[in-house]
């Protein structure tokens, strides 16, 4: 398998056992697991009527959270050592205690030195920690991101996979990252929400060119156009993933510009909010 170094991002507010599926995955892949416990520093006070006292309060909160993060790292190290499988996984546990404006940059730097970045536990779409960490892991790294959503994900033996295909560059990159994972699959669906033929993205027969490409890799593939029928694309895709009991959804992450995604939202954002199974994203 192509993964030898995996970064597992762990929210400092999550229980330690949220790391368990990532630990199992790293064992299956024979990969080193580098756990990064992520926390945000409190915002420093602006001009305040409390004067210097506001900075004293902020400094005390900054120190308290820093100490909590250090204790979390120590506790997680002990938890992993105790719950190691018989064929132990090599691992290390560190921390990233960053300001909101720099967390994405710091996570991006770490992710460049890995083969895969995992978000342990359930992805919290309303969490600034996870929103910034995901953007850091996806943008400017060239690495795929796996959102585990508290589920086991047998990357070494996947049977049912849904490819969320929109014909775009990011979707193509995600498929390329997933290609070696699909070798043992029994069922791979190219799922498209309201595809239109003769478009710049899809061509005359939506999904057919991707199906041909995958077939040359001996991957059993089906093209599945889906009618949204008043639902958004994410709802339509998630419903199909549920119907086929997909073990993994593969999709491009944030196909628009960062500014467009921020103001308008995106299928990626909606999938992150609603998906109840692992997502493999790439940008």
Image (cartoon, rainbow, N blue to C red):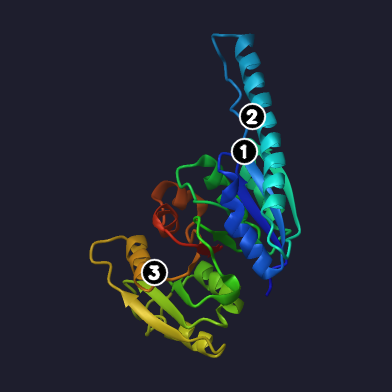
Q: Which mark is residue 39?
A: 1
- Observer-nearest residue: 245 or 281? 245
> Marks 3 and 1, Cα distance to the nearest angstrom?
32 Å
Q: Position of residue 27 (x, y in %)?
A: 68, 65
Q: Quadrant of residue 87?
A: bottom right
Of mark 1 and mark 2, the one earlier in the sequence is 1
- Residue plotted at (71% across, 35% down): 70
Q: Position of residue 116 (x, y in %)?
A: 65, 62
Q: Position of residue 164 (x, y in %)?
A: 43, 70
Q: How many marks?
A: 3
Q: Classify residue 277 as left or right of residue 13.
A: left
Q: Are marks 1 and 2 in contact (CB under 8 Å)?
A: yes
| Residue on which disc 2 sits | 65
Q: Residues within 10 Å of mark 2 (few under 14, many from 20)?
A: some
Q: Position of residue 276 (x, y in %)?
A: 42, 58
Of mark 3 and mark 1, the one earlier in the sequence is 1
Q: Is residue 138 visible?
A: no
Q: Classify residue 136 as left or right of residue 266.
A: right
């Amino acid at each position: 398998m192509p993964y030898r170094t995996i970064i597992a991002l762990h929210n400092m507010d999550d229980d330690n056992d949220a790391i368990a599926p990532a630990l199992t995955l790293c064992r299956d892949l024979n990969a080193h697991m580098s756990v990064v416990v992520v926390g945000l520093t409190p915002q420093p006070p602006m001009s305040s009527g409390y004067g210097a006292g506001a900075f004293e309060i902020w400094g005390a909160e900054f120190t308290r959270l820093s100490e909590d993060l250090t204790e979390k790292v120590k506790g997680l190290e002990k938890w992993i050592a105790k719950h190691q499988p018989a064929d132990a996984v090599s691992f290390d546990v560190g921390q990233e205690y960053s300001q909101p404006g720099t967390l994405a940059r710091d996570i991006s730097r770490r992710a460049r030195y890995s083969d895969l970045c995992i978000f342990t536990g359930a992805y919290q779409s309303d969490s600034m920690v996870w929103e910034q960490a995901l953007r850091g892991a996806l943008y400017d790294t060239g690495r795929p991101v796996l959102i585990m959503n508290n589920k086991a994900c047998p990357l070494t033996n996947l049977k049912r996979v849904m490819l969320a295909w929109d014909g775009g560059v990011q979707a193509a990159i995600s498929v390329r990252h997933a290609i070696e994972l699909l070798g043992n699959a029994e069922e791979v669906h190219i799922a498209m929400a309201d595809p239109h033929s003769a478009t710049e993205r899809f061509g005359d027969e939506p999904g057919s060119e991707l199906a041909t490409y995958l077939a040359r890799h001996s991957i059993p593939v089906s093209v599945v156009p889906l009618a949204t029928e008043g639902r958004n694309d994410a709802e339509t895709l998630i419903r199909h993933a549920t119907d086929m009991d997909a073990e993994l959804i593969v999709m491009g992450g944030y196909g628009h510009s960062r500014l467009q995604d921020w103001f308008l939202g995106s299928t990626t954002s909606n999938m992150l909010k609603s998906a109840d199974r692992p997502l493999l994203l790439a940008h």
